[in-house]
Amino acid sequence: MNKIVILAAGKGKRMGAEVPKVLVPINGKPMIEYLIKSIKKSGIDKEPVIVVSPDNKDIIQKALRRYKCKFALQEKQLGTGHALACAKKVIGKNVKDIICIVEDSSLDLGELRIDYLQSDLNHAGVDSMAVALKSEKFAKVRVGVGECPEDVTMEDYLLQDFTIDENLLLIDILNKAEQAVRMLVTDRIEDVQEKYNPEGAPKIRKRQVKAIHIDHRKSQKNS
């Protein structure tokens, strides 16, 4: 069983929005509605789990009343890992594999990386997940957004408008990220890394143990 979790407990204060950030309209529709439609169309999960807060639960449920979704309540906003733990309670089954899709300012806009255990990713949300899960054994789909200028905050940088050229790169990278996620659902992570990482999958060297030769004839002679 594949489950998709959408973290929607944020209040959107940094965006200057009067509604929860997932309900900020794009072309007249809440942004989360585009995501829900894409999930339904993909067929990966017919009933995605949406993590909400006590403050925005009712308004988000009302906005998505036409769609079949499950809602997990995060009473206090204690980070990404805590939100994921709240979702796990609603899923109610043993979770075998997790795929985390995250923006990465250490990668240029348009770059994509698939990491597992060996990762140099420095991201508070991913670190929070590792703490909550008590493990770093989950796939990390790193979508490059480019380095943030020194005179701009990361929030303002991520929320600014894209240029025409950046939009073209964004369309390409999002398509690649979708294809990578689909492949992660069905294939080995090493195969996905081999296809999408510039250097391929990490080469893990097996420990070499030297063979020890025992001369039994010499042993018998000494005895």
Image: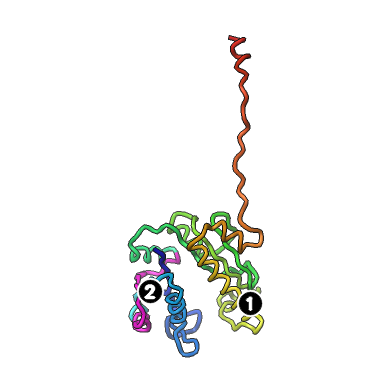
- The answer to whether residue 147 is above or below residue 27 is above
- Is residue 75 found inside the magenta-colored segment of the image? yes
Q: Secondary structure at mark 1?
A: helix
Q: Which residue is mark 1?
A: 169
Q: Residue at x 66, y 59 (%)?
A: 199
Residue 123 relative to residue 200: left or right:
left
Work out how far the residue at label 2 is from the one at label 1, CA to CA, in angstroms.
31 Å
The earlier-in-sequence mark between 2 and 1 is 2
- Image: 19 above or below 150: below
Q: With respect to residue 39, does 96 lie above or below?
A: above
Q: Which quadrant would the C terminus be assigned to in this image?
A: top right
Q: What's the residue type where badge 2 is placed?
A: Val
- 14 or 33, which lies in front? 33
The residues colored magenta run: 59-80
Residue 174 picture location, percent across and down: 56, 74
Occupied quadrant, residue 6:
bottom left
